[in-house]
Amino acid sequence: MKMSGLFGATLHTAPGSSESAGHRQMLRAGMVRQLAQGIFSYLPLGWRSVRKIERILREEMAAVGGQELSMPVAQPAELWQASGRYDTVGAELARFADRRGRGMVLAMTHEEAVTELARTEVGSYRDLPRMVFQLQTKFRDDARPRAGLIRVREFVMKDAYSLDRDAAGLARQYANQYRAYFRVFGRCGVPALAVASEVGMMGGELAHEFMYPTPIGEDTLLLCDACGYRANRQVATFAKPTPPAEAPRPMRRVATPNAATVAELAAAAGVGPDRIAKAVFVQADLGATEEPVIGVVRGDMDLNEAKLAAALGAADLRPMTTDEITAIGAVAGYGSPVGLTGVRVVVDELVAATPNLLAGANLDGYHLRDVNVGRDFTPETVRDIVAARAGDGCPRCGAALRTTRGVEVGQIFKLGDRYSAALGATFTDADGVRRPVQMGCYGIGVGRLLGCAAEAHHDERGLTLPITIAPYQVHLCQLGDVAAAAAQTLYERLGAAGVEVLYDDRGQRAGSQFADADLIGAPLRATIGARSLERGEVELRDRATGGSWPVPLATAAGAIGAAVADRLAQANAVGPVDLPPELATG
Amino acid sequence: MKMSGLFGATLHTAPGSSESAGHRQMLRAGMVRQLAQGIFSYLPLGWRSVRKIERILREEMAAVGGQELSMPVAQPAELWQASGRYDTVGAELARFADRRGRGMVLAMTHEEAVTELARTEVGSYRDLPRMVFQLQTKFRDDARPRAGLIRVREFVMKDAYSLDRDAAGLARQYANQYRAYFRVFGRCGVPALAVASEVGMMGGELAHEFMYPTPIGEDTLLLCDACGYRANRQVATFAKPTPPAEAPRPMRRVATPNAATVAELAAAAGVGPDRIAKAVFVQADLGATEEPVIGVVRGDMDLNEAKLAAALGAADLRPMTTDEITAIGAVAGYGSPVGLTGVRVVVDELVAATPNLLAGANLDGYHLRDVNVGRDFTPETVRDIVAARAGDGCPRCGAALRTTRGVEVGQIFKLGDRYSAALGATFTDADGVRRPVQMGCYGIGVGRLLGCAAEAHHDERGLTLPITIAPYQVHLCQLGDVAAAAAQTLYERLGAAGVEVLYDDRGQRAGSQFADADLIGAPLRATIGARSLERGEVELRDRATGGSWPVPLATAAGAIGAAVADRLAQANAVGPVDLPPELATG
């Protein structure tokens, strides 16, 4: 491609504001433009990177038996009502009425559609296993689009779906995708780590997220360097301390005026925070209804809202208002489940095991001492609902956990029969019995992956994307008209050799050409000017390291082609992927 | 691909009803499945054909300098309000509110979005000309989805956009696309012809449609075999007869009871149908308002609604109700513009030139004789608004026109500054003056093209798609376990040679295998069974002709590979494309 004809301008400064440095460089390089909040157009340079990522995805899906198909974006609401998600998924799901007034949705994911295909295409066990995938536009009306391509509303997703006879088949395909994902991220130059995650709106049995660790990430990960335990904070567990062994004492009321915080309360009452039962009042969104819930955790720990929501089967939680707290008979600041009825109570397992706790008296200025769960109030559920923190003990080996922030670049789910049972996708097994197809789903957002790659590969001058996904492999600079003929010849020879070259034929000054070359960031820059011509050489320069070296002009096409092929092979080489213990199969 | 692992079932009979025989065979072959009215999923076989069409489109767009990019489907309503189309386009444009209540649309085409990019990326004449294109999902809420993939609501479109400095540049790029379209249709095996068409909701100056002639088409085309004139009936003109030379006579009222048709009226009044002024009462949809309009054509001709709508700038027309006719002071069955005020009147040019016409008296049971346009009523507009018919004279050479029905498989538009002026996409020309970018747009629906190819290439046994777009090039049948090793070896050798093979390894009987092979319709079938093994041969069979011939097993991979390459080269060879007179440039 000659830059004189390229559509898309490089910019001195990025338009608008972006929290992400990688995204700013993509804007400056003329890769993408924002059309509306969280909605982007890809210019030709950016689209080349997307297409390369798509090719990598297609190759890795094919390598695990994936067959590409395509399912529609606009879908009838009935299909989502049949799965139950029309009601359980919130405003993220865009809904509209068609010209006849029929309810439609913009599919944010395709479990319903693929299950419908499984229903019609899979008749017997001979039609299983199968792995299908697509690269298709998704619309998710995210409440907080941010960080350029990393959190958007419209995007292309690679979504794959496995169809199996049984749990063992699903486990095999799930493990195949797990490994394929590391190959994808490795080839795209995005360092990713897999963590256990919650199933969320997908439902199902088990899920892993693939995380690119970066300070701009919104997720917090708990990692154990000793044994390799890795989990999203939403589901991370830890080795909880052993509760003290004490005989229950009689409950009694104590005055605790002006104790607004746990620390103040502990000081005022003369107990440690680990002996305080902290009540958190929330309203749980259960789709059709909203219900008041009290979560109780120890004063030395934090409630994990995701765990509490999962315990309740709630789509979302929000804090109660003071009026709502009053309405259930509690007192804000002095609340506890003691003496309340008609409200769901979920207690952390450590609270249930700790005797003689300090809890709110539901009376302004008073708490209760020596409260004991089971004796003084009866929770609906006892479960782990606290958040793991850096320094907590690893649940597997006990070593101290550390935290990092990350962006989710992919997620895989064991769905089991969550959708096949609801939508009637069954098959006749070898024993003649009809069984629901066992399903898994596996997603990677293409644009987000590019966004993470740009975040991982840029410097102050521009992008340094890996050669596997950079828009062009070689940036050819021609310094002055004297070099025009030689540059044109080299451009043609490289093209004939299959090397992707962006040729700056615009006659601009060297500094301007080099700045654009650094900004767009082809891994290799080749420069021909009067001085190099005199020496019969082309100057090559490595974008990432800044190192440069001459090659003879006469054989430059071959040398550059070999360098490109060598770098491609290296960048595409991904070592073997180890499965975590929970996925190890026989 | 081994059929034992293929996702998607072949069917004995097509599900549901389809007016299109080609679509029935695609359903039977397991290419597509309907998810909702006008909304389809593509199974892996069908998706392979789509991807091949997409590759052809990419190659032909690149050959005329097209750069691929991608613009979003979900777009803010403001952008469509700025172009004016938010109001002028009807229910076909799907609208929804995002989670913040902001108006959004599902883009049915991308003129607004590309103009927005032109606004930011094109600064000076040095940034022009450009040609950009995308392959992107579109949603058009068609009122009458039909004929399988031919008329759907969601589809992938190749939409290209040209950006130029001036009309001459636009004319060059328009001609390039015109030629590229014939190459695309030729390579996909769809015989197409180009006709002049109306610009419709796109606006702009000039448009051509590419039509696949078929009885299932909804469009009527007027063709001149003598000089090559070709036009959609919506815009087709013809050589109108010379009106009689007569002096105007005084207008007078005559009783015409029980004359319901033009023929009855002509007989009753003793005049020829060519001397009757037929008034057609319609309501014109002008976006914000609806207005009553009377169109007047001669009794021996038919009103062309598309021409009348174009003359009015109306999005749509509907017949007036009797009450609406009464409301403007006219009388149904005896109506004319004579004596009416406050209603727009559009008169065909031949009516205006014909003296002494018979017209309605706006009085039950009466007409007026010797009505003369200009004297007895004054039309707002005089223009050609009648429909050309088979047998009418060609407007260029006078020979008799013939008609055929067709499906539009592509359309190209000269937009000029229709969008660039409205959205501010200007550039600084060489003389320092800012001018609007001259634009063109060029669309091909990918699924519709596949639908037309299937319509053109099928028989009662299944599909006979050309080798360029058939899902697989070779269908390999293995008759009995005795042939398993030889078939597997040939399968691997063909794969290594880059031949796309669908290998029926399911162990079914020959008849069943051959039926599936005919249904899916790979251009070549290769069969290995006990008898052919004894002879050391593979039987090849041509799907389209039914002819068969043996090749030696030992060299079969090479022979089949050569046959495939030869057929591909032939199918991809498209002769030179002649431009029609209206596009001939210097």
Image (spheres, coloured by chain):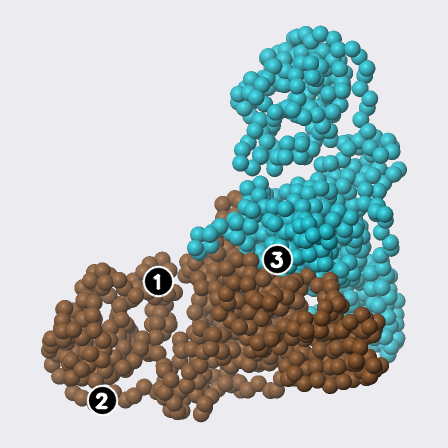
Chain colours: A cyan, B brown
For marks 2 and 1, the one nearer the N-term is 2
Image height of A577 relative to B225, above or below: above
Task: Work out how far the residue at label 1 is from the one at label 3, CA to CA, in angstroms.
Answer: 43 Å
**Where is residue B29 shown, x and y percent of the image?**
62, 68
- Numbered disc 1: secondary structure: strand
| Residue shown at 43% from the left, 88% from the top | B224
Measured Cα–Cα span from mark 2 to mark 1: 36 Å
Quadrant where the N terminus of chain B is found in the figure: bottom right
The residue type indicated by label 2 comes to: Pro
- Tell me the number on the disc at residue B285: 1
Q: Which residue is drawn at 46% across and 68% down?
A: B202
Q: Quadrant of residue A271?
A: top right
| Pointers 2 and 1 in contact (C-beta within 8 Å) | no
On the image, the x and y values in percent for residue A211 come to: 76, 46
Q: Residue at x 76, y 85 (%)?
A: B550
Q: Is residue B338 left or right of B569 when viewed as pictured?
A: left
Q: Mark 3 lies on which chain?
A: A
Q: Mark 3 points at which residue?
A: A120
- Furthest toward the front, the residue is A432
How many circles with numbers are drawn on the protein? 3
